[in-house]
Amino acid sequence: MDIAFSQACENNKKPILSVLKSAFANTNKVLEVGSGTGQHAVFFAEHLPQLSWQPSDLLINHYSINYRKEQCALENLLVPVTLDLNQPWQVVENLSLREDIDGIFTANTLHIVSKTLVEKFFIGVGEILVKGGVLCIYGPFNYQGKYTSQSNANFDLWLKQRDEESAIRDFERIVCLAGSVGLILLADNAMPANNRLLVFRMS
Ligand SMILES: C[S@@+](CC[C@H](N)C(=O)[O-])C[C@H]1O[C@@H](n2cnc3c(N)ncnc32)[C@H](O)[C@@H]1O
């Protein structure tokens, strides 16, 4: 099986890390939703050694994540768990998910999965994230129904042609869904290439 690689991850991991360093400064264990190739998991576990990084994704992506985990041998990088947003998070078998998760990170997932799964994502976060825990979401967003750039408009068209359920999400809808499970927006960070990094805290 081929090891998946994302050039975007290589481009965005340093700018993301610069925000995560302060957002997760008091965090012990981060659950990553939709770890994909595992490049982010390795890089953030390496550069945030004070916390444990729990990757997760559909089973099909575990091969690449496990390969990268074995190559780097970082003690704070945990074995990936299968977290499918179609399923309640409580069914995830690995016990570590039921321990204190005080950080959740996801990059470039909310525009890939359907609107319904975006809603389920927030239900899961609401069930798992401890009081005072931090949620970081990286990706492109629209504001007041408008694209922030022509490149995001082109990207959205490409997404929808590939899968009609995919779409760049509205920032206001994300803040509303987050609020419905008790998350308060702390920061909306501008990132390179017309992306954002949203930081929430569980009340
Ligand atoms: C564009 S990739 C982003 C991967 C990685 N976070 C990154 O930034 O490169 C979208 C991710 O969402 C995951 N995904 C798609 N459907 C999912 C589902 N139903 N439950 C959980 N993850 C899902 C994919 O497997 C993939 O890893």
Image (cartoon, rainbow, N blue to C red):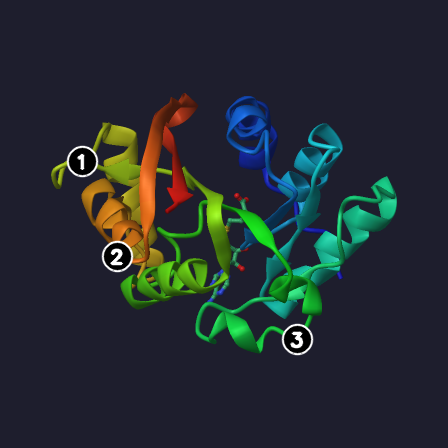
**At which x and y percent is residue 135?**
45, 44
Residue 104, compared with residue 63, is above or below; it is above
**At which x and y percent is residue 155?**
32, 41
Find the distance from the CA under tag 2 to the CA under tag 1.
19 Å
Q: What is the number of callouts on the image?
A: 3
| Tag of residue 143 | 1
| Tag of residue 180 | 2
Q: Kindly state the secondary structure of the residue where label 2 is placed.
A: helix
Residue 199 seen from this side? yes
Q: Which residue is drawn at 28% across and 45% down?
A: 156
Residue 180, compared with residue 116, is above or below; it is above
The residue under label 2 is which amino acid type? Answer: Ser
Q: Kindly state the secondary structure of the residue where label 3 is placed.
A: loop
Q: Is residue 100 left or right of residue 42?
A: left
Mark 2 / mark 1, whichever is N-terminal: 1
Label 1 CA crowd tier, 10 Å (few <14, some 14–19, many 20+) = few
Find the distance from the CA under tag 1 to the CA under tag 3.
37 Å
Viewer-nearest of labels 1 and 3?
A: 3
**At which x and y percent is residue 178?**
31, 51
Residue 166 or 28: which is nearer the viewer? 28
Find the distance from the CA under tag 2 to the CA under tag 3.
26 Å
Q: Which residue is drawn at 56% across and 27% down?
A: 11
Q: Quadrant of the N terminus?
A: bottom right
Label 3 CA crowd tier, 10 Å (few <14, some 14–19, many 20+) = few
Q: Which residue is drawn at 60% across and 39% down?
A: 27
* Residue bearing mark 3: 93
Q: In this view, does 88 lie to the left or right of 10?
A: left
Q: In this view, does 140 lie to the left or right of 77?
A: left
The residue under label 3 is which amino acid type? Answer: Glu
Viewer-nearest of labels 2 and 1?
A: 2
Q: In this view, does 49 lie to the left or right of 12?
A: right
Mark 1 / mark 3, whichever is N-terminal: 3
